[in-house]
Image (spheres, helix red, strand yellow):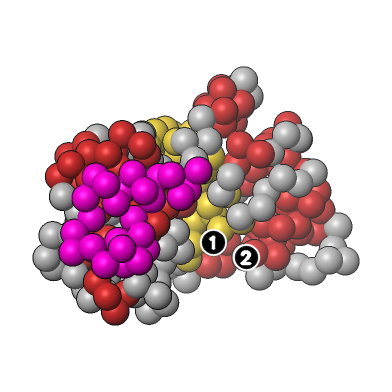
Amino acid sequence: MYCKYWGLDFLPFSNAPSVGSRSRDVLFRSPQHEEALNRLLYAVQYRKGGVMITGEVGCGKTTLVKSLPAFLPEAAFSVHMVINPALAADDLVRAVALNLGVGDHTCSKAMLIDSLEKHVAARYDQGVETVLVIDESHVIEDKAALDELRMLLNMQAHGRFLITLVLVGQPPLFGKIARLHPLNERIDMKIRIGPLDFVNTGKYIKFRLQRAGLEKPVFTREAAWLVYKASGGIPLRINNICDRALLVGFMDKARLITEHVVNKALEDLR
């Protein structure tokens, strides 16, 4: 609606990547996101087994893992994601198997696990590494389900993990895993993503606008500061505020997004 007015190719602050955008271009590589990406790539490429990524809602965890395939050789890595893991143990195993294209709804858990192991072993022999991402892992309440995930790391060949397991979730996941000693011991890499500071909030706003085709500054420094204070540096909240500010600016025929416009946007969001 406001794209033509501001000279944008698409909505810059959508919480879903724009159609046709490359995954690696969607990830804002702040210093902490860059470090998180490098740690994740290291764990995956050197087959470290278990990885845990935690952070508050909207910090960019899912964006990070969704961009992972774009940073890996396509022919050498197969990345799969389970996005709704709040399941009982047997159902979670089934969800993982079906996600990897193994088995069907009639198979027993034992058959699924056997088929899974044969599948990832065959892929390994073909030179393809399997990466399994469990998003929103903090919602898993069944300890047996978490134990089933741990058992996936028992699938090994020649002393190497056949699956790299990436658990992604909100901060409670950290404590949940810490209480499960056998699984915690298998988590080789623990990554935490926090909010952006003011400088990187400004850079993030500029990054999203440039991706949408706008090179000229639109948000004043004072407006960016207000966005930062109101959002706490959480990218999801920054997106919501900036999107509404661009809409308000369009309706007010503003030439820049100022403090006044952001304040109106915040009031509108309330």
Q: Which amino acid does label 1 sit on?
A: His
Answer whether residue 187 is magenta in the image: no
User: Which residue shows up at 83% across the image and 66% down it?
Assistant: 105
Q: Can residue 85 be seen in this view?
A: yes
Is 258 colored magenta in this rendering? yes
For image coordinates 73% across by 52% down, the residue present is 93
Disc 2 marks which residue?
100
Q: Residue 102: x and y, percent?
A: 69, 67
Give the side of residue 97 with respect to residue 23, left or right.
right
Q: Where is residue 9 in the image (x, y as percent from the top left)?
A: 29, 78
- Residue in the image at 56% along x and 31% along y: 173
User: Which residue is at the far front?
Assistant: 252
Q: Nearer the viewer, residue 115 or 246?
A: 246
Q: Quadrant of residue 106?
A: bottom right
Q: Can residue 153 be seen in this view?
A: no
Dominant SS type (magenta): helix
- Work out whether mark 2 precedes mark 1 in sequence or the reverse, and give the earlier one: 1
Q: Is mark 1 on a helix, strand or loop?
A: strand
Q: Is residue 88 left or right of residue 23?
A: right
Q: In this view, does 147 lie to the left or right of 215?
A: right
Report the Cα–Cα distance between label 2 and label 1. Answer: 7 Å
Dot 2 surroundings within 10 Å: few (below 14), some, or many (20 or more)? Answer: some
Could you tell me how many numbered marks the image carries? 2
Residue 48 percent across, percent down from the top left: 42, 42
Q: Are marks 2 and 1 in contact (CB under 8 Å)?
A: yes
**Mark 1 surroundings within 10 Å by alpha-carbon count, few (fewer than 14), some (14 through 19), many (20 or more):** some
**Residue 206, percent across and down?**
20, 56
Q: What stretch is highlighted in magenta?
A: 245-270
Amino acid type at image mark 2:
Leu
Task: Decide if residue 23 is on the left or right side of residue 177.
Answer: left
> Measured along the vertical axis of the image, is residue 107 above or below residue 34?
below
